[in-house]
Image: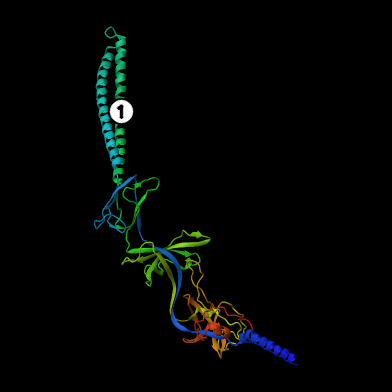
Amino acid sequence: MSRLLKVIAAVLVLGGAAAGAAWYFFGRSGAPSTYRTAPVRRTDIVSTISSTGTVVPEDVVDVGAQVNGQIAAFGLDKDGRTVDYRSSVDEGMLLARIDDSLYAADVKADLAQLDQAKAQVEVAQANREQARAKLDQAQRDWDRAQRLGPSMALAQADYDAARSTFEQAVASLAVTEASITQAKASVSMAEAGLLRSQRSVTYCVIKSPVSGVIIDRRVDIGQTVVASLNAPSLFLIARDLSRMQVLVQVNEADIGNVNPGQRATFTVDAWPGRNFDGEVHQVRFNATMTQNVVTYTVEIVTENADLKLLPYLTANVRFIVARHEQVLAVPSAALRWSPRQAGAPAAGSRPGGAQGQTQQPRQGRSGGDDAGSGRPGGRSRAGGAGAAVWILKDGKPQAISVKAGINDGVMTEIETSDLSEGDEVIVAEVTAASASNGAGGPSGGGASPFTPQMFRGRGR
């Protein structure tokens, strides 16, 4: 008998344990859900396109060298200090000097060659005068021989000799005329060579072509520069740092919303918390493709009177696409949320309501904001004419049809006659099971929309 009682007691214990487990896994999950809500409010909504870019000077001059040689010395800037990074220089001011010893020697050699060519011209001119004198003598002898003619007074041989001498004198004069022309050409060539060598000497003196600030010095004293097909770069000069531009890469999907004259704002990590204003100056047509992503370069101009913006800072840019002030808005999460099953029909007086409509569960839609497309230049998009938000009526979700407008990634503009400022809309659902695990109550209570909710779909 005692053994039978033990068996009965064991069965009762096992049955109670099974009942408790069944209640835990099935009964608890069927507990009513609670909802996290947020108020409808009036606020300013700014729709933007976000991207990153680089701050660069608006006008940069790359100063190079046209001759080969060794850097012998640097010049002085406006403050009397040796030219260096961030030195302010004026147009025509000496930046650097290249050793010109070889080029100065070339100048002397070309000067000597020019003098020699000029002397050859004088020699040729003297030879011409001598040839003219010989031609005059030969002309007279030939004239006399023609008057006498071959006769007893003048032998035939003398007659022929006079004629030959005259013809040779004429040819000799033509030769001297040609030698003068040749000598003058040699003078021109020598002058050109001298001009080239003199210009090479002047190229050894590197002067600033513009007034501005040196943002990069790429050579040192004693360094040898070699000018070949590409001139070596010595200095990089920004003409005016009080006006900068930002070069931004914008995705092809968003470039249609960027136009010249459009306002843009940007921030830089060097000055956290400060917004800089700019204006779109140009959208370049030379698109680039990287990993099948097509982007366009957009130029933004901005004032930099206080010189806070340094060249080549990374800028986080927002193009202002649209701005609506003091409009009704709800969190973007409210437009993405819907109940797993809409048990309460919308009131007939609410146009477009979800009366008698059954909604399917949408996982992972319980929070967060509209993060955009996730690509460079991505712009957040949400809503549309057929959007809906949900409110609590008698403790049950009820759909309200709205027309969604622009959004800023967190809040979305809505148009409806069924909601007013201060009304609460549902943004997330918190089950009783998740609440008991620390997920929080209707107001959030520290709940995270990304916290896994165990057995959420059971018991329904």
Q: Is residue 121 left or right of residue 326?
A: left
Could you say which is closer to the camera, residue 308 or residue 74?
74
Tell me the residue at 65%/87% (across/down): 20
Residue 170 visible somewhere in the drawing: yes
Callout 1, which amino acid? Ser
Relative image position of residue 194 (x, y in whole percent) = 29, 38
Q: Nearer the viewer, residue 220 or 298?
A: 220
Q: Depth check: 151 or 43 in front?
A: 43
Residue in front for this viewpoint, 182 or 400:
400
Residue designated by label 1: 179
**Residue 51, horizontal then vertical, whole percent:** 45, 67
Looking at the figure, which quarter contains the C terminus?
bottom right
Residue sitting farthest toward the top: 152
> Does residue 460 appear anywhere in the picture?
no
Q: Residue furthest front?
A: 2
282 lies left or right of 147: right
Total marks placed: 1
Mark 1 is surrounded, within 10 Å at the Cα level, by few (under 14), some (14 to 19) or many (20 or more) other residues, namely: some
Residue 259 image position (x, y, % from top left):
43, 66
Question: As displayed, is residue 305 above or below residue 459?
Answer: above
Vertical arrangement, residue 124 with respect to residue 307, above or below: above
Give coordinates of residue 174: x percent, y percent. Answer: 31, 25
Q: Circle 1 sits in a helix, a strand or a loop, which is it?
A: helix
| Placement of 69 over or under 89, stated as above or below | above
Q: Is residue 44 above or below residue 204?
A: below
The colour mode here is rainbow
Does residue 45 appear left or right of residue 59 in this picture? right
